[in-house]
Amino acid sequence: MSATKIIHSVPSDPLTGSISVPVYQTSTFIQEAPGVNKGYDYARTNNPTRKVLEDVVAQLEEGHSGFAFATGLAAIDAVLKLLSAGDEIIAVDDIYGGAYRLFTHVYEKLGIDVNYVDTTDVSNVANAVSKRTKIIWIESPTNPTLKVSDIQKIAIIAHSVGALLVVDNTFASPIAQQPIKLGADIVIHSGTKYIGGHSDLVAGLVVTKTAELAEKLKFIQNASGGVLGPWDCFLTIRGIETLELRFKKQSENAFAVAAFLKQHPAIDEVFYPGLSSHKNHDVAKRQQNELYGGIVSFALKEDTEAAANSFVTSTEYFKLAESLGGIKSLLCHPPQMTHASIPREKRLQSGIRDSLVRLSCGIEDVQDLIYDVSQALNTVSSLKEVLVKV
Ligand SMILES: *Cc1c(COP(=O)(O)O)cnc(C)c1O
């Protein structure tokens, strides 16, 4: 979507001409007579500030309707409520940890089965679907090893058994990838990440392809009530106004950092879908508008937690914190942080090695980010050995 379209998808206020979106900090709306109102009656059901955000996000993803929730997980939770006991989900195997926790510890208990497969190989998905499959749930790229799945092909498989394809588009953002245009039925976002973009809020978003799904989601949103408050809606809208600028700059920075890491003697493996060495590069290139996002992961030659600790505590600009996608660069060590709840064996199976570090590149000057990564790598002991030998 073009920058112009994004900027002008945010309306000025028709009542006052206010160029920015007003924050309607209210719980209720006065009625002229019972049931006679101006389209708003109670703020869980609808709020004018939230309505602007929901309409803008629907346009960003070129879907029918958008819905704003208190967090990304509340958005995921709302979509899962489309299901009934006995239904089955086919999910990407290295799914976001919070989604895994919700699927396994909340929904499996309620009679919903989840079958995890490696969706980067489309034949695994084709072999896994059954008549009970109601949702295929993918993330592309995934966290933290940035695996990419072919959305168009998986949509065809989902529809062949009457299932919905849900895509968690958090890592690509609608700037790189619009899953509904590729055949997905529902798109979800953690608005906390690129869409908010400033590490100053938590939010979740859902966009549906059809009016029919929109009606169901609207019902669930109002019935369960996990809505986003008006102030956070305002901040999310303000974030969206610069999303295109930020995401392109972050992608540029990450590409340069990934290329630097790739040739560095202390590095064993770099995960970045923009690199031609990445396993799913061809799909990523076709599907992501040649934009690969701000996240780069890597593993060290000295594949230990101690080496990773040395790196993550030595950076100046990359701040050690969970979360990603903001203007300020962050980094984390998934085995001890975001993915600590996954047993080590399982982590290793999905490529999350002991020394794996995830960088989220912000919008700083690229030479400063490369300098920072380079000086932090100098603290890793294996590099010292390499340099001595040279
Ligand atoms: C962070 C994240 C979520 C959860 O979002 P919250 O806003 O933290 O609840 C879901 N999916 C992905 C891919 C994420 O990165």
Image: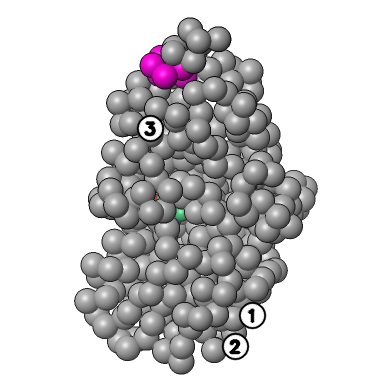
Q: Disc number at residue 156?
A: 1
What is the x, y in percent for residue 195?
55, 48
Image quarter of residue 147: bottom right
The amino acid on which the numbered mark 1 sits, given as a three-letter code, is Ile
**Placement of the N terminus among the 4 image quadrants:** bottom right
Q: Nearer the viewer, residue 233 or 363?
A: 363
Q: Which residue is mark 3?
A: 303
Q: Residue at x 35, y 21 (%)?
A: 310
| Mark 2 residue type | Ser
- Amino acid carrying label 3: it is Asp
Numbered label attached to residue 160: 2
Disc 3/disc 2 C-alpha distance (Å): 43 Å
Front in this rendered view, residue 38 or 301? 301
- Residue 322 is left or right of residue 281, and the answer is left
Span highlighted in magenta in the image: 377-383
For the question of whether residue 346 can be seen, the reply is yes
- Determine whether 358 is above or below 180 in the image: above
* Residue 382 part of the magenta segment: yes
Q: Is mark 1 within 8 Å of ligand 1?
A: no
**What's the residue at 47%, 40% (across, down)?**
324
